Image (cartoon, rainbow, N blue to C red):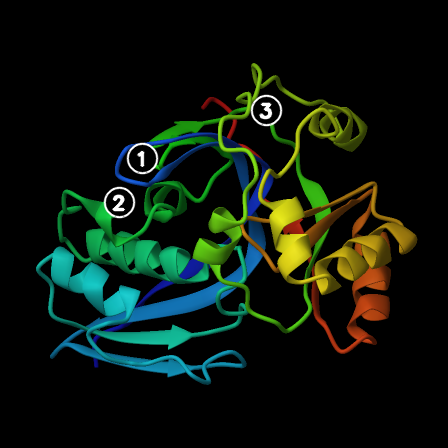
Amino acid sequence: MTAAVVETAMAKVNLALHVTGRREDGYHLLDSLVAFAATGDRVSLRAGPMSLQIDGPFARGLEADSGNLCWRAAELAGASVAISLEKNLPVASGIGGGSADAAAVLRGLERMGHSRPEGIDRLGADIPVCMLSQPARMQGIGEIVTPLSGLPRVSAVLVNPGHEISTPAVFRALTSRDNAPLGAIPSWSDLAALIGWLRQTRNDLEPAARDILPLISQVLAALEQNGAGLARMSGSGATCFGLFESDAQARKAAAALSRHGWWAEATELVPSQRGR
């Protein structure tokens, strides 16, 4: 049997997310500092008839058919391939799960000799940045991705309270859609410098998401109570993240937060590749 090509679909974390406008076609313009956590889904590809198998702790409810983003990504690339998806991340949770999975399929297909297809952003706004899976600034509707060189390694905890939240509902609930963009993005020498800069930014989707799902506020408060130097929601929620001074502190916090019945994962944010 041919060896599988394996890719990790790392969790996308919006460290900052500003909504800066809205196009005539209804798409919102964003300006976001994006990082990726070392934890994620696992995608395996083998040459063969087109198929998709899904397992893992968050596989329930996902359809393994042509409507799945993994399948659609392979079709866009003109590939017939057997895909196995191990779903380790919560679904519809603001950390790019489906987009990260589709991007992992496309990266795996490139390793198998397929060309990257045009129009990958049509699969989802997060696909271009998930293809990179490195710290980046994401602008426009997600199609403008600029790699960043200044993000250090950071200990972090991801927390999801077990409730899905509708991205369209969050955007509909926005009270302001023409906010100021991020300023110039510097390099950060350590966690304190990063947190100091992030405190001047925000996630413009967070207030609306909190109104829809007040439990998000409880998650953020719990992260702070357990030592997070900064706690914020990622994307349109409901997953939140906390930044910690050490791996040991992150593990301790994740253990405490999991006692609420929430999914809590101690991880690290992947640092920038030097020279980018």
Residue 234 locus on image (x, y percent) = 60, 49
Mark before the other along the chain sequence, 3 or 2: 2
Residue appearing at x 53%, y 24% in the figure: 149
- Could you tell me if the residues under marks 2 and 1 are in contact, i.e. CB atoms within 8 Å? yes
Determine the image quadrant of residue 158.
Answer: bottom right
Residue under the image location 71 percent in, 24 percent down? 200
Question: Does 166 appear above or below 110?
Answer: below
**Mark 1 element type:** loop
Location of the N terminus by quadrant is bottom left
Residue annotated with mark 1: 143
Residue 145 spot, x, y in % from top left: 38, 31
Question: Which residue type carries mark 1?
Answer: Glu
Image quadrant of residue 272?
top right
Amino acid, disc 2: Asp
Q: Which residue is mark 2?
A: 121
Label whose residue precedes the other's in the sequence (3 or 1): 1
Is 30 situated left or right of 190 in this image?
A: left
Q: Which SS class for mark 2?
A: helix
Inspect the image, locate mark 3, and give the three-letter code of the amino acid beneath it.
Gly
Front position among marks 3 and 2: 2
Estimate the x, y position of residue 252 in percent, counting from the top left: 86, 62
Q: Is residue 126 above or below residue 167?
A: above
Is residue 62 toward the left or the right of residue 267 in the image?
left
- Residue 8 visible in the current orientation: yes
Disc assigned to residue 150: 3
Say what secondary structure mark 3 lies in.
Answer: loop
